[in-house]
Image: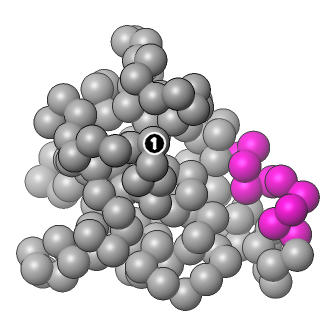
């Protein structure tokens, strides 16, 4: 585990967006995360959510979505740093989003990257900054 790299958590919506369109989430996923420029923080609960959401039938209408999702999940499992969460968080009404906050507590992640600014309507959580994919991309470019 390299602690000199930023520790990030990807909300599921960022992965979905990256696999559907060519935009900031795509840049974050393919140019930063999958090139191992950061430490991707995972928990079993977060990974299970990724698998569940990415396998929803509604995404099969997008060309190569399922195939690319399988590749991304396999790579995440390989490069991700797993943490066992020990503190329950009940801050966000969408219960599944609290798993990302629990992971942030355990991993001391630098960033949660999410397109869900409605539920993640606070700027930080116990030292973890909450940013959009576009904001994170701009931070990454500035630091490169």
Q: Can residue 99 be seen in this view?
A: no
Q: In the image, is residue 119 part of the stretch drawn in magenta? A: no
Relative image position of residue 114 (x, y in whole percent): 42, 55
Local crowd at mark 1 within 10 Å, few (<14), some, or many (≥20)? some
Mark 1 lies on residue: 119
Q: What stretch is highlighted in magenta?
A: 51-60
In-front residue for pair 85/131: 131
Taking depth in this image into account, of 60 and 131 the one nearest to the observer is 131
SS for dot 1? loop
Magenta segment main secondary structure: helix
Q: Report the residue that reaches farthest toward the top.
A: 87
In the picture provided, is 55 more to the left or to the right than 117?
A: right
59 in magenta = yes
Q: Residue furthest bottom?
A: 22
Here the colouring is one colour
x then y, percent, for residue 49? 65, 40
Residue 68 screen position, x and y as percent: 71, 72
Image height check: is 16 above or below 20? above
Q: In this view, does 8 lie above or below 137?
A: above
On the rendered structure, is 36 left or right of 52? left
Q: Give percent across and percent down for residue 70.
A: 73, 62
| Quadrant of the snapshot with the C terminus | bottom left
User: Could you say which is closer to the camera, residue 144 or residue 75?
Assistant: 144
């Amino acid at each position: 585990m390299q602690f000199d790299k930023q520790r990030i958590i990807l909300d599921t919506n960022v992965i979905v967006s990256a696999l559907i369109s060519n935009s900031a989430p795509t840049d974050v996923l393919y140019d930063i995360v999958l090139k191992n420029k950061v430490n991707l923080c995972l928990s079993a609960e977060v990974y299970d959510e990724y698998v569940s959401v990415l396998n929803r039938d509604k995404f099969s209408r997008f060309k190569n979505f399922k195939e690319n999702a399988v590749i991304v999940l396999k790579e995440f499992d390989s490069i991700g740093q797993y943490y066992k969460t020990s503190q329950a968080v009940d801050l966000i009404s969408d219960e599944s989003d609290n798993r990302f906050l629990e992971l942030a507590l355990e991993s001391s992640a630098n960033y949660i990257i999410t397109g869900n600014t409605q539920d993640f309507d606070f700027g930080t959580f116990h030292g973890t900054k909450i940013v959009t994919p576009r904001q994170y991309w701009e931070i990454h470019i500035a630091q490169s």
